[in-house]
Image (cartoon, rainbow, N blue to C red):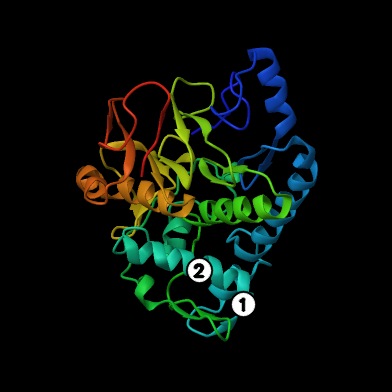
Amino acid sequence: MTSTLDPAVSPGGASRPRITADAGATTLAQCTYVQPAWSCMVRLIVADRTVRDVAARDLTALLDLVDRTASRFRPDSALSRANANAGRPTPVPALLVEFVRAALDAAAVTGGVVDPTVGLAMQRIGYDRDIRAVADSSDPVYPLAARASWHDVLLDREADLLTVPPGTALDLGATAKAHLADLAALVLSRRHRTAVLVEIGGDLAVHGNAPGWNVLVAERAGTPGQLVLVRHGGLATSTTTVRRWTRAGQPMHHIVDPTTGAPTDGPWRTVTVHAQSALAANTASTAAIVLGDTAFDWLTARRLAARLVARDGTIVATAWWPSVGLEAVAS
């Protein structure tokens, strides 16, 4: 998903005067900060352009802090230490407790369809380092032995102790970007007293007093998409079209079915969801990819605004997703 302010609309949205496309582009540039992080692009847009630079520094510091705490690719991270001590209680920072809590909540909401205990499964299929360093390989993928699940993760929130189940490793990739987008949007909006949009690799959160943000929903940057109006909460896209590689000639990607330990092989290649937070939206979009044939009914039962792209490019949407044009996405 790519997200932008419509160049013809001021950062405040439709309640403010329309401005020319050129002036709008200038205003957008002055309000926007973009940087690479976590193998993706991070975008910050603030309604008050005077605070952009200081807000960007705050966001960069937060990204670095969470990376040092919750990355499974850094041997010095608190998460890596807990994974290395699987089966034993490990003291961890309160920040990691918060991110593990978010991952376990996502698992509970989806009945384990989104499960953070897939870390070893990720390693098994070759996703054992930053995606930029993952290369195609002739190594086969061996069957996955029976393992524990999210139910077996022990998290003591008062003592800041984490026990990773033996024979597993935690991977917070399905929830960490979205949860950080939520936290960053909230913190930056309150700290700098302005409306804020934060997007981290397709997981987008908004906070503050703005009538709405115009967001282009597309599978990849530069490709056709649909412009929607996001007034609150979060918007997230999960897709199997990126973060891909091969093992022994078999295509691999980063969304794993926890019941098989293998990349999902369902009918949907991309799912976008709007929900009350980026975390809730990404939890639902990831679950939909894993659920496959039952995803549409699952999303509908939860009255979620969702846009699903099938393998052949066919697009279907739930009743709460805007049908045409620039309409507010409702959830």
Question: Residue 115's spot in the image, x, y percent?
Answer: 38, 62
Query: Residue 311, located in which quarter of the rendered image?
Result: top left
Which quadrant does the C terminus fall into? Answer: top left
Residue located at (59% from left, 23% from top): 9
Which residue is identified by label 1? 92
Residue located at (29% from left, 58% from top): 260
Residue located at (50% from left, 51% from top): 127
Query: Neighbour class for label 1 at 10 Å: few (<14), some, many (≥20)?
Result: many
Say above or below: 8 vs 171.
Answer: above
Q: Secondary structure at mark 1?
A: loop
What amino acid is at disc 2?
Val
Q: Secondary structure at mark 2?
A: helix
Residue 100 is marked as: 2
Query: Residue 19, located in which quarter of the rendered image?
Result: top right
- The tag earlier along the polypeptide, 1 or 2, is 1
Q: Are marks 1 and 2 in contact (CB under 8 Å)?
A: yes
Mark-to-mark CA distance, 1 and 2: 11 Å
Say above or below: 8 vs 164.
Answer: above
- Front residue of 213 and 86: 213
